[in-house]
Image (cartoon, rainbow, N blue to C red):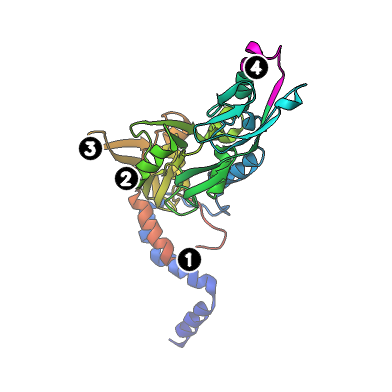
Amino acid sequence: MGAHVAERGRAAQNPRISLFLILFIWLPFLGGFLGCVPLTYKSVAKPQSPVPQQQDYQQQQILLQSTQSSLNNYQDYKIGPEDVLVVEVYGQEALKREVRVNGKGQISMPLVGVVKVSGMSTREAEARLRELYGSEFLKNPQISLEVKEFHHQRVAVTGAVDKPGFFEIIGPRTLLEVLSLAGGFSSKPKAEAGDVIHVIRQGSAADVAQTIKRTGYLRSFDPQTKTTVIDMKRLFSGEFPALNLMVENGDVVHVPFAGNAYVLGGVRKPGNVTVRENLTLSQAVALAGGVDPLLGTNKITIMRFDKEGRPQRIEADLKKIQDGRDSDILVHDNDAVVVFEGEAKKKLWVLRQLVPIPSGGYAIPTQ
């Protein structure tokens, strides 16, 4: 009897014998499903972030491109009331004038009298003056016109930006410059920007002010508005400079909020993901941390509502999508993506919490 007690005490002091006894006790329970879920011990690297920080990149592009606005943009500036213009006629010093555009958008010049220039670019105004002077006063006149002082303009920036509100600007400003005044895109959770920018323009600044005063806001595609939709990817690529529009007095720059989908079940980080242009099922799962190796399977169901509000279920197999046997599926706003959990894996997960596994990590295939 004493020998048995002494032997048992030595076993308690030997951690290898203790681990052997624990595994011996749990072996009958593990045998039922270890065959269907092979367990291998190896070091598992921490998963890398599946998608680059798109928002940080966009913020950098706003700051970079807004400071690199081409001087050509100023040549397209539209003259308006209260602007101060300098007009020179080559060889005719007596005709040089520094004039302020009146409230009707007109200036007064020697010989030709009152000339309407509001809404014209500087090149267009030069061409109009050459036409007037060349018609009966001068032969082939050479005229230059520059804006010495720009009138104050007011624009609004709304939606998914860091500091929405009204901004007073002087002189021509591009879309990216105005976005930089508003602090770039919002950094608040669940308030990310979508894939496009709306530049909303009405007939006059007075119309814009009246609409905002009456409704409290100005929506895209309201009656009597002209809305230009700008694709963010193309704008930030720098390959389409024409998309960096000149913002005019009274314009509203609206950045729509991105939608959200919900990834649930056997993923590492269940929760909502931001739905941007062409977000696919495999990308949504990656944004949720990927399939949990202990719990998740490749079986996925997407639950959504159609245009008539009827519920839909779309079944998918992540393994087939990754292998190219099935097409990836686009994820819509408000979709619920459910990654199914395997029953055997659930049991193994519970045991994993109870039975310590030797150091070195673990990896479980998700086939």
Amino acid bearing label 4: Tyr
Question: Dot 2 corresponds to which residue?
Answer: 214
**Pick the front one: 27 or 122:** 122
The residue under the point 39% across, 57% down is: 348
Q: Nearer the viewer, mark 4 or mark 2?
A: 4
Question: Dot 4 corresponds to which residue?
Answer: 133
Amino acid bearing label 3: Gly
Query: Would you call the spot at circle 3 few (<14 residues within 10 Å), some (14-19), or many (20 or more)?
Result: few
The residue under the point 71% across, 16% down is: 141
Answer yes or no: is residue 365 visible.
no
Callout 2 secondary element:
helix
Span shown in magenta: 131-144
Q: In whole angstroms, how far apart are the C-alphas of marks 1 and 4?
A: 94 Å
Q: In whole angstroms, how far apart are the C-alphas of marks 2 and 3?
A: 32 Å
User: Earlier along the polypeptide chain: callout 3 or callout 4?
Assistant: 4
User: Earlier along the polypeptide chain: callout 3 or callout 1?
Assistant: 3
What residue occupies the far bottom of the structure in this picture? Answer: 2
Q: Which label was assigned to residue 356?
A: 1
Q: Position of residue 114 (x, y in %)?
A: 56, 25
Q: Position of residue 45 (x, y in %)?
A: 58, 52
Callout 1 secondary element:
loop
Q: In whole angstroms, how far apart are the C-alphas of marks 3 and 4?
A: 67 Å
